[in-house]
């Protein structure tokens, strides 16, 4: 087992990275990131997801152009699209794929690879670019690459007493 304090410290040190080196990510490391996603829990173990690994620079640039706050996506050597299969689990696909994304982001960080959650993207245009069927849900695209420049400082977190409530 992992030491709980070390794990908590690891969670706290992860950052959103928006500047990437042009260095390719080895396929073995991409596979580890995908395996971390595949290992995620899901409602009734349905696993209603698909992962699309994008290495094509033209496609990556097109995705960057439809993400208002994600122009930096174009720097990433790899982008992983996380797709929820609505037909497999129409109730919990968003929650299930969100768990996938966090597992992937944490595995990437463990490998020294930076990622950033992209919430603001024209999902319908992205689905067209990636050939995702209309009935599936594009949760996010995760640009990733080795970190260029300094790792950002931690962002302030709310005090625990402001966000915690105990019912006994």
Image (cartoon, rainbow, N blue to C red):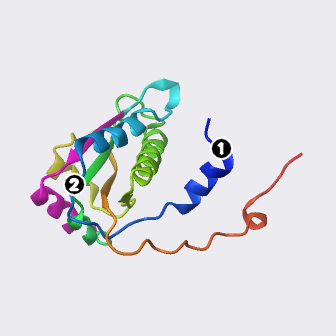
Classify mark 1: helix, strand or loop: loop
Which numbered disc covers residue 126? 2
Say whether disc 2 or disc 1 marks the residue closer to the N-terminus. 1
149 left or right of 79 in image = right
For the C terminus, which image quadrant? Answer: top right
Residue denoted by label 1? 3
Residue 9 at x, y = what percent?
Answer: 61, 57
Is 63 inside the magenta-drawn segment?
yes
Q: Which residues are magenta?
A: 49-67
Residue 166 at x, y = what percent?
Answer: 83, 52
**Residue positioned most to the right:** 168
82 left or right of 78 in image = right
Classify mark 2: helix, strand or loop: helix
Nearest the viewer among 73 and 31 is 31
> Where 97 falls versus 67 (above or below)?
above
Nearest the viewer among 148 and 40 is 148
Is 25 inside the magenta-drawn segment?
no
> Where 150 falls versus 78 (above or below)?
below
Q: Measuring 38% from the left and 32% from the top, which residue is drawn there?
A: 48
Q: Measuring 23% from the left and 42% from the top, which residue is drawn there?
A: 27
């Amino acid at each position: 087992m992992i030491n709980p304090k070390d794990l908590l410290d690891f969670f706290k040190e992860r950052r959103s990275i928006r500047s990437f080196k042009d260095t390719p990510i080895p396929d073995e490391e991409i596979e580890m990131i995908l395996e971390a996603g595949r290992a995620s829990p899901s409602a009734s173990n349905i696993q209603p997801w698909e992962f699309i690994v994008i290495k094509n620079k033209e496609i990556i640039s097109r995705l960057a152009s439809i993400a208002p706050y994600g122009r930096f996506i174009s720097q990433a050597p790899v982008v992983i699209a996380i797709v929820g299969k609505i037909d497999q689990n129409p109730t919990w696909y968003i929650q299930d794929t969100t768990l996938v994304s966090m597992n992937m982001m944490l595995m990437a960080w463990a490998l020294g690879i930076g990622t950033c959650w992209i919430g603001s993207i024209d999902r319908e245009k992205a689905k067209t670019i990636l050939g995702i069927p209309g009935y599936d849900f594009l949760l996010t695209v995760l640009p990733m690459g080795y970190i260029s420049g300094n790792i950002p400082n931690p962002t302030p977190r709310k005090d625990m007493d402001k966000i915690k409530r105990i019912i006994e």
